[in-house]
Image (tube, rainbow, N blue to C red):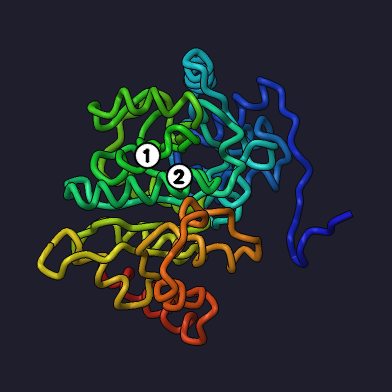
Amino acid sequence: MTQPPSGAQTPPQLRMSEDDRIARLQLLRSPRVGPATYRRLMAAHGTAAEALRALPDLARSKGVKSYQLCSEHMAQREYFTGKKIGADLIFEHEAGYPRLLAEISDAPPFLWVLGQHEQLTRPCVAFVGARNASSLGTRMAHRLAAGLAEAGLIVVSGLARGIDAAAHAASLPHGTIGVHAGGLDVIYPAENSELAKSILQKGARISEQPIGFHPTARFFPKRNRLISGLCQAVVIVEAAAKSGTFITARQALEQGREVLAVPGHPMDARAAGCNVLIRDGACLVRSVDDILQAIYPATQQPPPLSPMAAQKRPQTIQATLPLPHCKTQAYQTRRTDLVQLCTNKF
């Protein structure tokens, strides 16, 4: 029998009643309860019902006056509205919760999931980039995403226009995951409504936000940590020098994910961010094979057959393929420098 790696914990899978799910949802939707507080309360009290009973007194002991829990009615309304649109509430330690996402420090205690749940347990690669992407950028994103999907990887992105939409569209035949900044029933931008519907045929859409919630700007970085957290690597296609994509790159690095970028013309402002990331340590992407070489040595798994593998390549191209980025001696130093760059940008 295969043993888990040293230090790894495999908690027993949860079996929850509907009442317990609603109680956990009520606890998480109560003021001042985030992932860390939720886990402390559950560890201290054992059940969500007991934690809810203790929470008002705990809040008062911390100087919070007139503390009001999320009402049971509000939690029930969210739960049954989600079920009505066909979504499921998956909590951490349940069978369908993504393993890689569970490893990040601020993993959401649950996810709303719509579509094909099994896609959440497969190896994933994220695509992020410019909303006002060039035609060349969208073509590159489409080519890379299609190739990775054909190689057996699930493409994850944020349902935005530009690079996100191109990556989702290219991987539709094999399954793709769209991550919402708001509720699962809120499609932003609205122009991607048909794309969002198509994703559900072979893929999935997920969110940690309430059904019906319309996001503001501060919720998009929260969404982006899920995009990178689900994946082994994040591929950046077109990003300006002061793009919010640097937030996602920083989050990915902090989570221990590979960061890869597609280079662009020095005169194109939309490529400036990618060029800076590559200069400071991100893996340069020319093809699907570059992505596979970067991520699979890190996971110690044999890479899947890429779409290009069956094609004959000139010997000169084969000879110039670099060693896997994560195997180079300077990798850890360059990774530290890259974290600092992304931190300084934001």
Whether residue 12 sits left or right of residue 129 in the image: it is: right
Label 1 element class: helix
Q: Kindly report which numbered mark, 2 or 1, lies closer to the viewer in this rendering.
A: 1
Residue 191 picture quarter: top left
Q: Which residue is mark 2?
A: 155
Rate crowding at label 1 as few (under 14), some (14 to 19) or many (20 or more) other CA atoms within 10 Å. Answer: many
Nearer to us in this view, 304 or 316 = 316
Q: Is residue 105 above or below residue 135?
A: below
Q: Based on the displayed image, in which of its 4 quarters is residue 104 positioned?
A: bottom right
Which residue carries the number 1 mark?
170
**In this orientation, does residue 181 appear?**
no
Give the class, few, some or many, for how many residues have Cα within 10 Å of label 2's Cα (few <14, many ≥20): many
Q: For this view, does 300 lie left or right of residue 7? A: left
- Pick the front one: 56 or 270: 270
Percent x, y for residue 165?
30, 38
Residue 143: x and y in percent read 35, 48
Q: Residue at x 54, y 78 (%)?
A: 327
Q: Position of residue 109 (x, y in %)?
A: 57, 42
- Please indicate whether residue 295 sits to the left or right of residue 131 in the image: right
Amino acid type indicated by mark 1: Ala
Q: How many marks?
A: 2
Left or right? Give the position of 34 relative to 266.
Answer: right
Residue with the most extreme right position? 1
Q: Tell me the kind of residue under disc 2.
A: Val
Q: Are marks 2 and 1 in contact (CB under 8 Å)?
A: yes
Q: Secondary structure at mark 2?
A: strand
Identify the mark nearer the N-term, 2 or 1: 2
Residue farthest along the left direction in this orientation: 267
